[in-house]
Image (tube, rainbow, N blue to C red):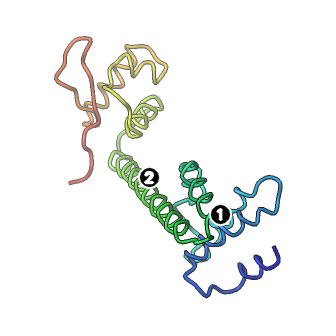
Amino acid sequence: MRAFLDWFNKPAALDPVLKAAQAHLWFVTIHPFDDGNGRLARAIADMSLARSENSPQRFYSMSAQIQQERAAYYDALERTQKGAMDITPWMEWFLGCLGRAIDGAQTTLAAILSKARFWESIAGVAINERQRLVLNRLLDGFEGKLTTSKYAKLAKCSQDTALRDILALAEHGILIRGTERGRSTSYALADVSPA
């Protein structure tokens, strides 16, 4: 462990992202504790990546991505540790996983920015808490079509209140009515982004 810590704390002689991958592998291979080595190895990788970016903010989590890809992670570790200790496959897996973590963060950030733009574009419209709740559900990827009965269930209100809320949102151009009529009448978010 002393040799590992000395190496880890020295300024990197190799690319800091590669050092993060190597540090993770070496720590989990040393396996100094009975429990928690994987969590600590992920924290070490995240710390090393944060150092490599020289920034207090990161919008992705390598640790979370490794957790999502647990089976592939264990396969890559096992192949590396049981082989001739050629770490190339591990490094390739780690860098691929890092790329997927960054891609996932970009997707998440795009959704957050889209949601923020939506709320900014309707800032002048009076929205009650029920409407806010349902609009957030729609923005978060509500499955299916929004009907008065679904609105009432989501907002925990009567169907009459749901219809009034929906009609008010439609009047402001926030919701648009589908082509169905009667009980099948449904609504969807309108494109309210500024032109």
Query: From mark 2 to mark 1, how far is it between C-alphas?
Result: 34 Å
Quadrant where the image shows the C terminus:
bottom left
Q: Residue furthest left?
A: 179
Note whether 173 is above or below 148 in the view shown: below
In the image, taking residue 185 as reference, residue 133 lies left or right, namely right
What residue is disc 1 on?
A: 81
Q: Residue furthest top?
A: 183
Between 66 and 114, the one lying in front of the other is: 66
Marks 2,1: beta carbons within 8 A: no
Q: Position of residue 6 (x, y in %)?
A: 77, 82
Note whether 148 is above or below 63 in the view shown: above
Quadrant hosting residue 135: top left
Which comes before the other along the chain, label 2 or label 1?
1
Residue that appears at 71% across and 63% down: 28
Q: Position of residue 191 (x, y in %)?
A: 25, 43
In the image, taking residue 55 as reference, residue 103 lies left or right, namely left
Residue that appears at 81% across and 63% down: 32
Q: What type is the residue that disc 1 sits on?
A: Gln
Between 120 and 103, the one lying in front of the other is: 103
Q: What type is the residue that disc 2 sits on?
A: Thr
Between 104 and 178, the one lying in front of the other is: 104
Q: Which mark is residue 108?
A: 2
What crowding class fits label 1: few (fewer than 14 Cα within 10 Å), some (14-19), or many (20 or more)?
some
